[in-house]
Image: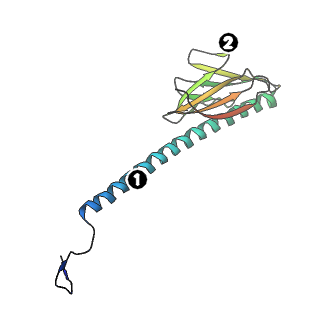
C-alpha cells in the first residue's frame, strides 16, 4: 500500500474503497439481479400461457369453420387428466408443463368424467362452454358462445 505524505508532514491514507463498501455494492447488485430474474420468470410464464390459450382459441375457431364448410357438426374435446385437447383434425395436442386445464361444457356432451366436449354445428352455433388455463395466479379463459359459436379469450388474475 502506498502512502502519500502531505506537505505538512502528516500521513494520509491511500484512497480507495473499504471492504464494507464493496460488500454493500455486491449485496445491492444481488438484490437487483434477484428482482429482475423473478420478473423475467413471471413474464415467460405469462407468455407461455398466452400462447397456449391463443393456440386453443385458434383450434376452436378452426373446428367451427370446419363444421360450417363441411355442413356437419364437429367436436372439440378437452381431456383435463392428460392435459390434452383435439379439434377438427382429431390430433391430440398436449399443453406445456406447469399449466392446468379445466373445461365447463354440457353434461350430455362429456364422453367420460375427465373429458369435456364442445360441439359446433353447420350454422356456426355451438353447445357453448369455456376452457380455463391456469398457471400460478394467472388465468386465461376461452369462452365459446352457444348461440353464435364465437370464441373469445379473457386474461384475468385467478381468485384465491
Where residue 38 sits, quadrant-wise, is top left
Local SS, label 1: helix
Residue 101 seen in the current view? yes
Q: Which residue is mark 2?
A: 108
Residue furthest out toward the top: 108
Q: Is residue 109 above or below residue 139?
A: above
- Give the residue drawn at x 19%, y 85%: 8
Q: Which residue is mark 1?
A: 33
- The picture places residue 104, in percent across and down from the top left corner, at 63, 20
Residue depth check, mark 1 versus mark 2: number of the one nearer the observer: 1
Q: Is residue 89 above or below residue 113?
A: below
Residue count near mark 2 (Cα–Cα under 10 Å), binned few <14, some 14–19, many ≥20: few
Where residue 55 sits, quadrant-wise, is top right
Question: How many angstroms separate mark 1 from mark 2 (CA)?
Answer: 52 Å
Q: Is residue 23 above or below residue 7?
A: above
Q: Is residue 144 left or right of residue 28?
A: right
- The picture places residue 117, in percent across and down from the top left corner, at 65, 21
- The picture places residue 81, in percent across and down from the top left corner, at 52, 23
- Give the residue drawn at x 67%, y 12%: 108
159 or 24: nearer the eye? 24
Q: Earlier in the sequence, mark 1 or mark 2?
A: 1
Local SS, label 2: helix
- The picture places residue 33, in percent across and down from the top left corner, at 40, 53
- Give the residue drawn at x 27%, y 68%: 17
Amino acid at each position: 500500500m502506498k502512502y502519500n505524505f502531505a506537505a505538512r508532514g502528516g500521513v494520509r491514507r491511500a484512497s480507495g474503497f473499504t471492504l464494507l463498501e464493496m460488500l454493500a455494492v455486491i449485496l445491492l447488485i444481488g438484490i437487483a439481479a434477484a428482482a429482475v430474474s423473478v420478473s423475467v420468470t413471471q413474464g415467460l410464464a405469462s407468455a407461455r400461457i398466452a400462447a397456449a390459450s391463443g393456440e386453443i382459441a385458434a383450434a376452436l375457431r378452426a373446428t367451427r369453420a370446419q363444421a360450417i364448410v363441411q355442413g356437419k357438426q364437429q367436436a372439440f374435446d378437452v381431456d383435463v387428466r392428460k392435459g390434452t385437447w383435439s379439434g377438427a383434425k382429431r390430433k391430440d395436442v398436449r399443453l406445456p408443463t406447469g399449466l392446468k386445464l379445466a373445461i365447463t361444457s354440457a353434461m350430455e356432451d362429456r364422453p367420460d368424467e375427465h373429458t369435456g366436449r364442445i360441439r359446433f354445428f353447420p350454422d356456426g352455433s355451438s353447445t357453448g362452454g369455456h376452457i380455463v388455463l391456469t398457471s400460478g395466479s394467472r388465468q386465461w379463459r376461452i369462452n365459446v358462445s352457444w348461440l353464435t359459436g364465437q370464441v373469445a379469450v379473457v386474461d384475468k388474475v385467478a381468485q384465491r
